[in-house]
Amino acid sequence: MNVMSVTVSIPTPLRTYTAYRSEVEVNGSTLAEVLSTLDRQCPGLRFRIITEQDTIRPHIKIFINHQQAGRLSTTLRAGDHVQIICALSGG
């Protein structure tokens, strides 16, 4: 396994898990590894993003270098930028 550092942008509603940091540097070669590492650094964050069935929650969108990622198995490279987006709802 080749471990690489990527930057993860955290949306405002989830920043309580990151001590209000808007970006976190984490290691991982897949999106799943990055989110697991992120959860070890910021406990509870992964559950807000990923379901118990290991799928991305319907109200969450994840982009890697401005391209939407649909699977946790998506491969990452050193220097990639992962952006987590929370959908807003209301009426």
Image (cartoon, helix red, strand yellow):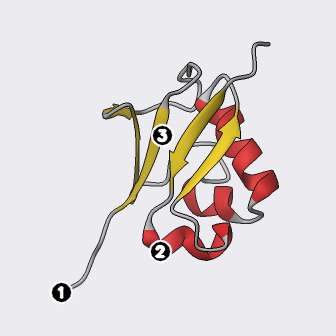
What residue is at 74 percent from the left and 44 percent from the top? 36
Q: Is residue 72 above or below residue 55?
A: above
Q: Residues within 10 Å of mark 2 (few under 14, many from 20)?
A: few
Residue 40's label in the rendered image is none
The x, y position of residue 84, in whole percent, is 45, 51
Can you give x and y, in whole percent of width and height, for residue 41 in the image?
78, 55
Between discs 2 and 3, the one toward the N terminus: 2
Q: What residue is shown with label 3?
A: 82
Residue contact between numbered discs 1 and 3, judged by CB atoms under 8 Å: no
Q: Residue at x 75, y 21 (%)?
A: 3
The three-letter amino acid code for the residue at tag 1 is: Gly
Q: Which mark is residue 91?
A: 1
Q: Residue 75's x, y, as percent?
A: 56, 19
Q: Are marks 2 and 1 in contact (CB under 8 Å)?
A: no
Residue sitting at 60 percent across and 53 percent down?
Answer: 51
x%, y% of residue 12?
45, 71
Which image quarter holds the N terminus?
top right
Is there a contact, CB below 8 Å, between mark 2 and mark 3?
no
Q: Secondary structure at mark 1?
A: loop
Residue 13 numbered tag: 2
Q: For the residue marked with disc 3, what is the amino acid?
A: Val
From the image, state whether disc 2 or disc 1 is nearer to you: 2
Quadrant for the C terminus in the image: bottom left
| Left or right relative to 42: residue 53 | left
Q: Residues within 10 Å of mark 3 (few under 14, many from 20)?
A: many
